[in-house]
Image: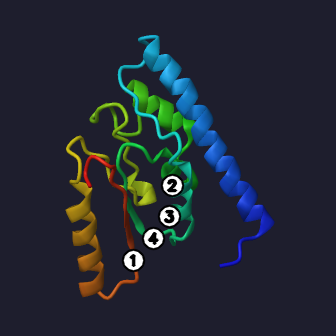
Amino acid sequence: PEITDEAALKLYRGMLQVRLVDDRMMKLQRQGRLGFYMLSMGEEATHFGGAYALESGDWIFPSYREPGVFFWRGYSIKDYVNQLFGNIEDPVKGRQMPVHHSANWLNIVSISSPVGTQIPQATGMAMGARISKKPDCALVYFGEGTA
């Protein structure tokens, strides 16, 4: 499909944002100021390529290394950092480990510790949409450890 210059620039800026956020958060983790963090370096295009193709009502089932899908959907850097620190402004109120982001208002399901759990979740959502005759789509990410 054709991509406008404006969309291409937005996608590029999103990928750059992920790279910069990753760099800063990893530095904080190495300093002992952040308990846990996982890089997504080199995988940024997969975040935006998948999320760009979706409609706003479609669902995303991420793994650890997809902060770009959150940012693309409107999850702010402030929400992202607050969740990592588990502070009072954490969108999930400290109910998840750091890096286990969740944004139900954006149709993004919570990240889980066991790898691969999001695959049957996404399949169930897609089957439910099909049975309900809804046009909703499920996008699932899983890392090399799952494959």
Residue for badge 4: 57
Tell us which disc is closer to us: 1 or 3.
Answer: 3
Q: Callout 4, which amino acid?
A: Gly
Q: Amino acid at mark 3?
A: Gly
The count of marks equals 4
Position of residue 2 relative to residue 131, above or below, is above
Q: How far is mark 1 from mark 4, CA to CA?
A: 6 Å
Counting residues from the start of the chain, the first of labels 2 and 1 encountered is 2
Q: Earlier in the sequence, mark 3 or mark 4?
A: 3
Residue at label 1?
136
- Residue at image position (47%, 41%) is 40
From the image, tell me which residue sits under label 3: 50
Which quadrant would residue 76 be assigned to in this image? Answer: top right
Between 84 and 120, the one lying in front of the other is 120
Mark 3–mark 4 contact, CB under 8 Å? Answer: no
Quarter of the figure with the N terminus: bottom right
| Helix, strand or loop status at disc 4 | loop
How many angstroms separate mark 3 from mark 4 (CA)?
14 Å
Relative to 87, say whether 1 is above or below. Answer: below
Residue at screen point 52% across, 19% down: 27
Q: Look at the numbered disc 2 and give the secondary structure of its residue.
A: helix
Q: Which residue is mark 2?
A: 47
Label 4 Cα crowd, 10 Å radius (few <14 / some 14-19 / many 20+): few
| Mark 2–mark 3 distance (CA, rounded to whole Å) | 6 Å
Q: Nearer the viewer, residue 103 or 138?
A: 138
Q: Position of residue 19 (x, y in %)?
A: 59, 37
Give the structural element (helix, strand or loop) at label 1.
loop
Marks 1/3 in contact by CB < 8 Å: the verdict is no
Q: Position of residue 100 (x, y in %)?
A: 33, 39
